[in-house]
Image (cartoon, helix red, strand yellow):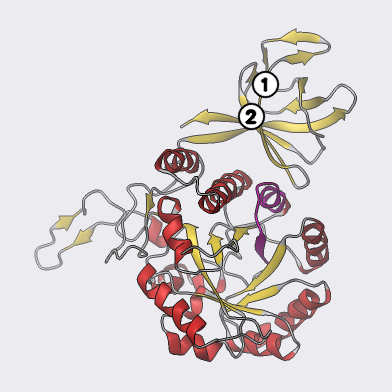
Amino acid sequence: MIDKKKVELLSPVGDFSCLKAAINNGADSIYFGIGQLNMRARSTTNFNIENINEISNICKKKNVKTYLTINTIIYDHDLSFVKKIIFQAKKYEIDAVIVMDQSVMNYAYNIGMNVHLSTQVNVTNTESVKFYSNFSDAIILSRELSLVQIKNIIKYINKNNIKGPSGKLLKIEIFVHGALCMAISGKCYLSLHYYNSSANRGACKQNCRKKYIVINQENNSKLELDHEYIMSSKDLCTISFLDKIINTGVKILKIEGRGRSPEYVSVTTSCYREAIDSIYNKTFNKKKIVFWIKRLKKVYNRGFWNGYYLGNKIGEWSKVSGSLASQRKIYLGRGIHYYTNKKIAEFLIESYTLKVGDKILIIGPTTGVKKIKVDYIMVKNIFKKKVFKGQICTIPVKFKIRSSDKIYKLIKK
């Protein structure tokens, strides 16, 4: 029986454009990192400590919760900065910190900062849940669990009234979409061994995403395994059985992707928002699932599989090293001016060409991600079918354009 109170949709945020995209598309909460002490330290632009107040203010105005990730391995020389980050998070009323290391957990707990336990801790059983409930109000379970195992853990929490430090019933959170690592709970050392760049310090070089050939050292024969990238897992996609996930009693559904683009955040958040709402409205059906998956395939992905939730024993490996997205974006130019009365935006085209009928993305830290179709183009008050690199043009846009906005053309891959 599905709980009448809706689950929380948690979206990834790597910069202010992603933040706006998440909020605009229905995220209930967002998670972000600061500097080098989070698991996406290298793969995204990230925020700095001075951004915490601004992030908090933006989200509070929209009634969106904020979670700060400090989920890497921590060394002694990191501790002073860790304490500074957590102090700032508490000062500016960030809702919780997502942690792996016990030192971070302990410090946050001692100053009264809410703690969520990272999937890197690899919690897989009820005794671990009970132990960590002394410090944490939410636990992100290991990605390798099945729905049956997750449901049993939640039953145990409810039956035994397991509460976190806040005095509220402990929440369980799981990932529902995005990249998966071949290593248990993401604890991989390949990048460290090959490049001296530790994945557990947020600096993964993604060796697993490359193609490998297995060599038999006895006879020197080579084997290319089914033309697959045998360590590179496909992306997790659960939208087809999201109703079953919600039925377990999970309280927070998390989308992976702080290193991915604003349009990825926009599309994934929008699709899972619609799916969650349709489950509670009792309109969730196969036709909608097909539509959502088609949309999800348009943005960055390595192919989809269901993860371990339905009882799969091994991973499904990607056929490519990069993205299988059905469409991609190419950079065209940037915003110059917006004529509010006429609702016309002026752009400088810096590469390629723009023509009438093109579908474009306008992305910016305040704008977020907006998709429109170009109805007409004008250059010096003259209608044009096409505009070229180096030209300034105007097109009809119903929302305000800023100089920080970039314009991209969407094309089929």
- Above or below, 301 against 37 in this view is above
Residue at 82% in and 72% down: 92
Place of residue 123 in the rendered image (x, y in percent of width and height, measured from the top left): 46, 81
* Residue 252 as seen in the image, left or right of residue 311: right
> Which secondary structure lies at badge 1?
loop
Query: Residue visible at 54% across and 46% down?
Result: 271
From the image, tell me which residue sits under label 1.
374
- Image coordinates of residue 34 in percent, x first then y, are 69, 68
Front residue of 123 and 197: 123
Identify residue type, mark 2.
Ile
Specify the farthest residue to the left. 219
Q: Quadrant of residue 220?
A: bottom left
Q: Is residue 412 visible?
A: yes
Residue 24 shown in magenta: yes
Inspect the image, locate mark 1, and give the three-letter code of the amino acid beneath it. Answer: Val
- Mark 2 or mark 1, which has the lower sequence index? 2
The magenta stretch is 17-35
Q: Residue at x 76, y 22 (%)?
A: 396
Label pair 2/1, CB-CB below 8 angstroms: yes
Front-lying residue, 130 or 323:
130
Can residue 178 be spotted in the picture? no
Q: Is residue 89 left or right of residue 280?
A: right
Q: Where does label 2 land, which residue?
A: 360
- Expressed as whole percent of the image width and height from the top left, the position of residue 149 reads 37, 75
Q: Which mark is residue 278?
A: none
Q: Quadrant of residue 146?
A: bottom left
